[in-house]
Image (cartoon, helix red, strand yellow):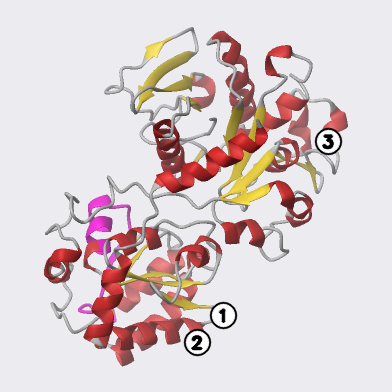
Amino acid sequence: MCASEMVPFAKTGGLADVVGALPLALEELGLEVRVVIPKYKTAHLSQLAARDIGSDIEVTKIGKNTQVYLIKNDAYFNRDGLYGDKNGDYPDNLERFSFFCRRALEILPEINFRPDVIHCHDWQAGLIPVYLKTVYSKNKFYKHIKTIFTIHNLAYQGVFSKEKYSKLGLDWSWFKIEGLEFYGKVNLLKGGIIFSDSLSTVSLAYSKEIQTREFGCGLEGLLHQRKKDLFGIINGLDYKVWDPAQDRYIYKKYSPLNLEDKYANKKLLQEERGLSAREDVPLLGMVSRLVTQKGLDLVTQGLEELIERSRVQMIVLGDGDAKYHNLLRDMVKKYPRNLSLCFDFNDPLAHKIYAAADIFLMPSYYEPCGLGQMIALKYGTIPLVFKTGGLSDTISEDNGFIFKDYSLRSFTYAVKRSVFAYEDKKRWLKLVKRAFTYDFSWEHSAREYVRLYKKLT
């Protein structure tokens, strides 16, 4: 398995969580998994007994015996950020990750490991299928290795100027529409899509959405051509981290058997965040990047009406666009007992919000998979979502509230429906207890990937 980030070594987003959890689930199913990632400056190795196996490779292990190889190159990876800094993306990202892809392939004979399948994640690993079928196509060692390429978010494609193409070490004959050319530029994600043996993305609905013009980001035609090779497998959730019965961050641990302690969490968080401590008022929670993609346009436009007319409270945790920060700051000045804000990533507070909230908002315009809605269900907190991607694969009217038209009217109506349901205590208790019954553990997702690997071999 090859990826640009992985928990516990380096993380900017959900990709790292997937790459940290999936190999362990595959190991439990009897597969031998080895992972290759870059060794960043931020890599946390002190407690993982890493050792050198050559001048530019360190190896450690996770789980029972899943080997993780970290590729060293100080010029490329010894930086504060993984992909960029406050000025934007690093200008040499093409060189950084083309080096990573070639070196990931080169170390295989060095460690005497010939995998049946290389599972590549996102554009940073997109050149591995390309190199296998071009640069290494005549090398017997690599002849029977298959690839699967997983797209976690199609919006991030690794697009660079044509002038950088020569640095890839590929023949110019591959700079064409049927290759890596994309509107006169180089597109590394496109390379992964074309050259991989199989494709996956992180939910069934998203695998279909990315074949449309609305969500295809210019690659919908190519993805439609490969639809027979494209599969949607929902990401799993690590219940060792997300479980209210053993969560060390929340005020009181609870389960479906002692739901009164869920409401104790609500009261204590209301008090901590300066909200009115009222059980009769529904508490909305949101843990998200504060950007338009996550539905912040709808939230900021509709929140005042919802506070005024539906008497809701809301706690928002996240960072994002300045305009949404400012709109929410103005709102909290007006409604300090109804709205609480925290504009940074605060993991303990995230756990407290999942435990204390009655309703969890995820009105994302698009959401390839989403984990928040799965976490919310585990905590007996009812998700309210827009019908898109992984949200539509995991949430229905049986376990949440859905709006199907991305508009302010539909969003506020869905919130009002959820408030109406909350006021019916018997109905609400039934909904909360049902939420606990859903299981999105990694074992199920891992079995889906195993089936996909077997198809290739």
Compute the Cα span from label 2 to label 3: 47 Å
Is 416 drawn above or below residue 115 in the view shown? below
Magenta stretch, residue numbers = 334-354
Residue type at tag 1: Asp
Classify residue 279 as left or right of residue 72.
Answer: left
Look at mark 2 in the image and give the residue it sits on. 409
Mark 1 element type:
loop
Front residue of this view, candidates 324 and 60: 60
Look at mark 3 in the image and give the residue it sits on. 175
Residue 123 lies within the magenta run: no
Residues tagged 2 and 3 counted as in contact (Cβ below 8 A): no
How far across and down, in percent of the image, does residue 10 sit? 41, 34
The crowd level at tag 2 (other Cα within 10 Å; few <14, some 14-19, many 20+) is few
Which label lies toward us, 1 or 3? 1
Classify residue 363 as left or right of residue 106.
Answer: left
How far across and down, in percent of the image, does residue 397 sit? 43, 77
Compute the Cα span from label 2 to label 1: 9 Å
Residue type at tag 3: Phe
Mark 3 element type:
loop
| Residue 91 in view, yes or no | no
Look at mark 1 in the image and give the residue it sits on. 405
Is 281 drawn above or below residue 46 in the view shown? below
Residue positioned most to the bottom: 309
